[in-house]
Image: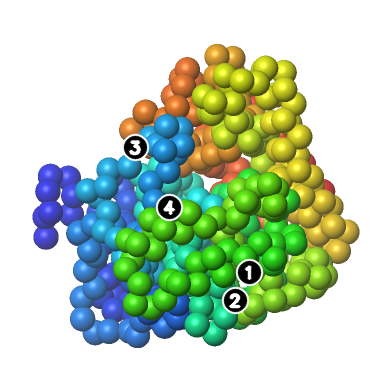
Amino acid sequence: MQLQQHIETHTFRTAFGKILALKQNGIFKAKNIRYAHSERFKRPVAIKPSDSEIIFPEKTPVCPQNISPLLEKMIGKTNLDDFEVDESSQFISVFRPENFNENEKLSVVVWIHGGSYEIGCGDLTTADPIDWVREQNLIVVTVSYRLGIFGFLGGTDERPANLGLFDIIEALKWVKNYISYFGGDAENITLFGQSSGGDAIAHLMVSEGVEGLFKRVIIHSAPLGLRQNRSKMSAEFLMNTKNFNINSDVLEIVEDYKKNTPSFFKYGLKAAMPFGTQYGFPPLCNENEAEEKWKKNAENIDVLIGLNDEETSFYLRASDHINTYLPKKIIDKTIRSTTEIIYGKPAKDFAESYAKAGGNVYLFRIHPRLSGNQFMGAHAIDLPFIFGNESAWKNAGILNNIPWTYVDENGRKLRKLWAEFAQSGKIANDSERPEILELRKI
């Protein structure tokens, strides 16, 4: 079957069903497979296997959300015509090299996207893993899940907490059960997440119902400094949105919750991420139990964790208002301090505690070393290096004055290192490092 020039289809015959995939440029992509379904404010229900052919939707399903002007400026504009709003947004896509040894099982990386638990989806062009898959001969699975009001704010019987986390767990069960039909190794699965995606992975490590679902984790730029003492803020936010129910109009929900977000004056930096995982509600443990549970799991899960060198420059240097009224010296100092509070010190503390408990853990920092760009170590600067795909990043403000040849050269080396970790849990001392990376075994 021929869809258009140079694009063909291939059918994977699995116990889940006959899954139609695109074949293009040496990659199979089985896109937008529904792994679960949910009603509003209910836990996900896994999709049952079927004998029929599973055909991907024409447009990418995405959880209802607002467009972020900051992301439009820093990452690039979103082509809304490519997406279809779906409140039950439990979909995955599987990327596999076309040519591989049938007797060989490929390592599997599961991508959990970021976006403050509020925006994004698994299938964005800026996180298209085809370069990684083609270069490193592995399988990448991208996951979409519920966000915002629909997935990460709750605390009552009518509106349970952590529904988005339950979605991700269902996705991981799907991968565990069916990835072998794509040539993947179900015993060698690595979770990889950035920003809130990394935060979600850290909390999956201490969640119920995930035993045996993954072996390693790669955590980029997780805002672990915002994870504690959130219960009062979440309860207030839930109360302020109590009028939202199963009958509320979805557009009304998306438009109106912004009027009720927590106050910075009252809750400080935590208010920058009003949605999130909530301790004390399934599948999570209580907040005071989390650190011991991480230590308990240390010998079972390999960890690669780190950050970009100036994470909060993404927000502070992008603000015309801040740059108009504050001197550069104050902005630079604020970037350094907030980066360490939200990302740096928590990542270091996590890694050192995990290592002391017997865990295999690496700690990294990313900072491109070019002049002429004020976002060289900013939040999300790691993504073009990891995923490549020049056309998707051509209008990104975050890459202003950075030659793509620099991104590509360093990105290839970084992807190789991360693939080495995903395949073995180790990074050899003599493996080539890109110049943008500082990495050490803890």
User: Label 4 belongs to which residue?
Assistant: 120
User: Label 2 belongs to which residue?
Assistant: 155
Residue 156 versus residue 97 in the image, above or below:
below
Mark 1 vs mark 4, foreground winner is: 1
The image shows residue 89 at horizontal and vertical percentages of 37, 67
Q: Earlier in the sequence, mark 4 or mark 2?
A: 4
The residue under label 3 is which amino acid type?
Lys
Q: Specify the quadrant of the image occupied by residue 332.
A: top right
Q: Earlier in the sequence, mark 3 or mark 2?
A: 3
User: Label 3 belongs to which residue?
Assistant: 77
Mark 3 vs mark 1, foreground winner is: 1
- How far apart are labels 4 and 2 at the CA level? 23 Å
Mark 2 vs mark 1, foreground winner is: 1
Circle 1 SS class: helix
Q: Specify the quadrant of the image occupied by residue 94.
A: bottom left
The residue under label 4 is which amino acid type?
Gly
Residue found 43% across the figure and 71% down from its top: 244
Disc 2 vs disc 1: Cβ atoms closer than 8 Å? yes
Q: Specify the quadrant of the image occupied by residue 191.
A: bottom right
Q: Earlier in the sequence, mark 1 or mark 4?
A: 4
